[in-house]
Image (spheres, rainbow, N blue to C red):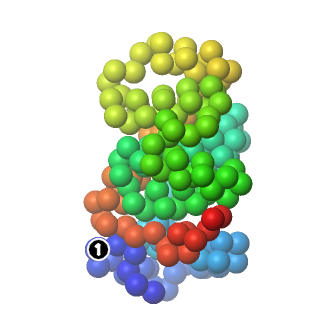
Amino acid sequence: MENPTALDLPPASPLPEGTAKFFSICEEKLGMVPNVLRAYSHNIEKLNAFSAMYNDLMLGESGLSKLEREMIAVVVSAENRCFYCLVAHGAAVRELSGKPELGEALVMNYRVAKLSPRERAMLDFAVKMTVNSREMEESDRQDLRNTGFSEADIWDIAAVAGFFNMTNKMASAVDMRPNPEYHAQAR
């Protein structure tokens, strides 16, 4: 397996039993181990922390659907021009929505996508948070409330956007490369 980043950080060897099992489950369910996990596997504690946060934000209980969380990941990644996340999470949007054109629109410019008022408000908030978080105001949160988001939903929107701002910057800094399999998914 080619190194998933530009850094020469080999995976822990041998992988701890729990990590090896986790990677095996990924292989079984996804047909691959995502390169982001391989990249973090040089330090199992960091991999576990990253995975726990990702799983909580993207798969845990939330008033946001899995698709909505993936949409946030894509628009934040588009603003940050994160190649890894645009490819990986663009594929997830295509798959979850059943609309390849939605995934493509979000990658290129979410403003051209056919979105509900709720989705538009959510993505506008995530983009403003990404581009100019210091200008966030009560009116930005109120726009979300006006389209039906709860206080907990607003927290989750901010948490997902914040997480992807961090991971985008990390992926760009180490030249993390997406798995080739993502490119053909849900097209």
Residue 53, percent across and down?
54, 50
* Residue closer to the observer: 52 or 54: 54
**Near-viewer residue (76 or 101):** 101
Return the x and y of residue 183 as percentages of the image width and height. Answer: 53, 69
Residue holding disc 1: 6
Res 145 quadrant in image = top right
- The number of numbered badges drawn on the structure is 1
- Assign the N terminus to one quadrant of the image: bottom left
Residue at point 39%, 21% (across, down):
136
Task: Determine whether 83 is above or below 44 in the image.
Answer: above
Which amino acid lies under the numbered mark 1 shown in the image of this protein?
Ala
Above or below residue 25? Residue 64 is above
Q: Foreground residue, 5 or 96?
A: 96
Residue at 39% x, 60% y: name it: 83
The relative height of residue 35 versus residue 130 in the rendered view (above or below) is: below
**Image point (47%, 13%), residue name:** 138
Left-right relation of 89 to 169: right
Q: Is residue 6 above or below residue 65?
A: below
